[in-house]
Image (tube, helix red, strand yellow):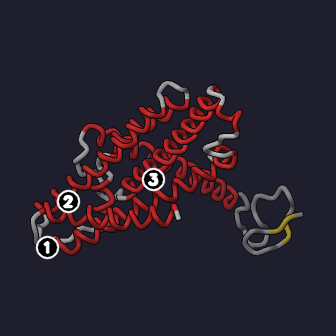
Amino acid sequence: MKYCINCGAQIKEEAKFCPNCGQDQTKSVKEEQTSESFADNETVQQTIALSKSYFGYFMEKLRRPSSDLTGNLTYFGYISMGIYLLLQALLSTMIISRGIGAVNQFLAMMGAYDYGYDPFGTDLVNGVGFSFFLRIFIFYLLALAITVVITYGVERITLKDTVSFNQTVNQLANFLSGINLFLLLFAFGLFIRLFSPIICLIIMLLALSLFQFSIIFAVSHNAQQKKAKIAPFYIVLLIFALNLIINWFLIIATIG
């Protein structure tokens, strides 16, 4: 026996309608199944739409880095920055690991270890793993957060028409599509030993330089559009000076 979904009266298992209130016993089940199916399909469709939207954003930023495509999708800049941080941390970990391994092989070939000479130590060599990657990632995350906050803060002070924090993030992420693509290619090349750690280190430094260029570009653009209170040169100089000082203290704190 089962019970009516409307009045709770006891009805037969095969009953499609309640003899007491006349409620259709199949309607609720069908609606629930339809609702669940719709929800599942909607989730899938939203996921597909999001991936397509970001891919379109990524490709357009490759073609026209300075174009304004954010609209209401202000999180795309955050996604690009997150990818940038992951790739930089991954490349740094791989470069350090390969570099230490290469030096160890060279010293072993030269017979240095026969005399007890060990410049790195077993703990350091074995420590270049996920925990090391995580520490590098957190360091880069803090450094990038400092850069974004300083840029936003200085623009708030020096521009007559201020920009939002989301605008600052998306403007600084303008060139990250191309940068991330190169970092990904060279990280894969380093993994399959197509590129040497030295070449990948140069690419990392180049990527960092291009990101600094995006700061100059964004600040100069905003200084013209938002009526800067002082010359754009001094705004950029102030941002880089504050960024250098605070990141220097971050490096000292990390090493110490």
Mark nearer the N terminus (1 vs 2): 1
In this rendering, position of residue 216 left or right of residue 102: left
Q: Residue at horizontal 16%, vertical 70%?
A: 159
Residue position for label 2: 219
Residue 160 image label:
1
Query: Are the residues tagged 1 and 2 within 8 Å (C-beta)?
Result: no
Residue 16: give x, y in percent of width and height.
76, 58
The kind of residue on which mark 3 rests is Gly
Spatial CA distance of label 3 from label 1 is: 30 Å
Q: Nearer the viewer, mark 1 or mark 2?
A: 2
Q: Secondary structure at mark 3?
A: helix
Q: Residues within 10 Å of mark 3 (few under 14, many from 20)?
A: few
Above/below status of 201 relative to 244 = above
Above/below status of 88 relative to 163 = above
Q: Secondary structure at mark 1?
A: loop
In this rendering, position of residue 190 left or right of residue 150: right
In this rendering, position of residue 125 left or right of residue 59: right
The kind of residue on which mark 1 rests is Lys
**Camera-nearest residue between 251 and 113:** 113
Query: Are the residues tagged 3 and 2 within 8 Å (C-beta)?
Result: no
The quadrant of the image that shows the N terminus is: bottom right
Above/below status of 242 relative to 183 = below
Q: Residue at horizontal 63%, vertical 53%?
A: 131
Q: Residue at horizontal 29%, vertical 43%?
A: 61
Residue 123: give x, y in percent of width and height.
68, 49
Instruction: Please indicate, yes or no, whether residue 129 appears anywhere in the rendered image.
Output: no
The kind of residue on which mark 2 rests is Val
Residue position for label 3: 82
Residue 231: give x, y in percent of width and height.
9, 65
